[in-house]
C-alpha cells in the first residue's frame, strides 16, 4: 500500500514539474514582444509637445500610438494628423495636415503620408502625397509631385526642398505655372527653370 501511495505522489510531482517547464518564456522573446508593443495608445488627442522646456508644436489626431521601446522609437498617427509648428515666441509659422504620419523621436524626423497639405505664414498652400520633415537639419523635402498655390498663381512640379517655415523653398523640376484667373483650357504647361522662393 505504501508503494502505491508513494508512486502516485511521485507521478503527481512529475506532472507538475513537466507542466511548469512548458510555460517558461525566455527573456529574449519578452524583449522582442516589448519592441513591437506600444507604450501608449490614445484616441482623440489634442496636445502641445515640448522639447527641453520649449513648446515646439501642437498635435490634433484621432489616434496616437507610441512605440517607445522599438529599436528606433517612433510615434504613429494611423488615422490622420493636424499639427502646428511654433517659433520661439509661440507664434504658429506652419500648419500641416496628412492622412497618416510617423515621427521618429530620436532623429526628430517626420514622415507625412497621404493628402499632405501645408500652409505658411504668407498663406501659400503646399500639396503632395508624401513629405519629409527633418527638424534637426531645418529641412522639408519630397521627390514626389508638389503643387503650390500662391495668391496669383499655381505652381506644379516634381521634387521640393524648403526650410521648416516654408518661407525659403525650391521646386526642383517645375512642370507648369498657372495664373489663378486663367481658364483651365488656357493653362500654360511649358517647362520652366527650377523655382525658388526666398524670404
Image: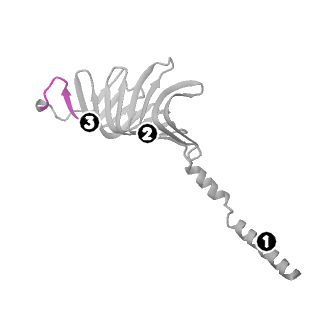
Left or right: 35 with respect to 155?
Answer: right
Magenta stretch encompasses residue 194: no
For the N terminus, the image quarter is bottom right
Label 3 environment density (alpha carbons within 10 Å; few <14, some 14–19, many ≥20): many
Q: Which label sits in the foreground, 1 or 3?
A: 1
Residue 125: x %, y % from top left: 31, 27
Task: Give the extent of the magenta segment.
Answer: 174-184
Q: Earlier in the sequence, mark 1 or mark 2?
A: 1
Location of mark 2 (residue): 101
Q: Residue at x 22, y 25 (%)?
A: 153
Cα separation between marks 3 and 2: 23 Å
Q: CA distance from mark 1 to mark 2?
A: 54 Å
Secondary structure at badge 3 equals: strand
Element at label 2: strand
Residue 29 x %, y %: 62, 58
78 vs 52: above or below? below
Q: Is residue 182 above or below residue 26?
A: above
Residue 13's label in the rendered image is 1
Amino acid at each position: 500500500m505504501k508503494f502505491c501511495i508513494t508512486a502516485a505522489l511521485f507521478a503527481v510531482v512529475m506532472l507538475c514539474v513537466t507542466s511548469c517547464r512548458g510555460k517558461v518564456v525566455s527573456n529574449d522573446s519578452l524583449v522582442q514582444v516589448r519592441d513591437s508593443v506600444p507604450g501608449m495608445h490614445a484616441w482623440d488627442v489634442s496636445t502641445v509637445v515640448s522639447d527641453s522646456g520649449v513648446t515646439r508644436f501642437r498635435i490634433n489626431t484621432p489616434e496616437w500610438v507610441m512605440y517607445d521601446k522599438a529599436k528606433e522609437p517612433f510615434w504613429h498617427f494611423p488615422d490622420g494628423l493636424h499639427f502646428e509648428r511654433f517659433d520661439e515666441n509661440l507664434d504658429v509659422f506652419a500648419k500641416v495636415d496628412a492622412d497618416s504620419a510617423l515621427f521618429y523621436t530620436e532623429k526628430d524626423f517626420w514622415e507625412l503620408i497621404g493628402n499632405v497639405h501645408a500652409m505658411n505664414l504668407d498663406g501659400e498652400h503646399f500639396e503632395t502625397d508624401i513629405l519629409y520633415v527633418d527638424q534637426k537639419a531645418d529641412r522639408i523635402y519630397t521627390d514626389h509631385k508638389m503643387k503650390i498655390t500662391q495668391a496669383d498663381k499655381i505652381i506644379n512640379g516634381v521634387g521640393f526642398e524648403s526650410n521648416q517655415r516654408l518661407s525659403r523653398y525650391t521646386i526642383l523640376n517645375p512642370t507648369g505655372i498657372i495664373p489663378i484667373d486663367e481658364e483651365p483650357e488656357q493653362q500654360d504647361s511649358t517647362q520652366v527653370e527650377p523655382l525658388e522662393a526666398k524670404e
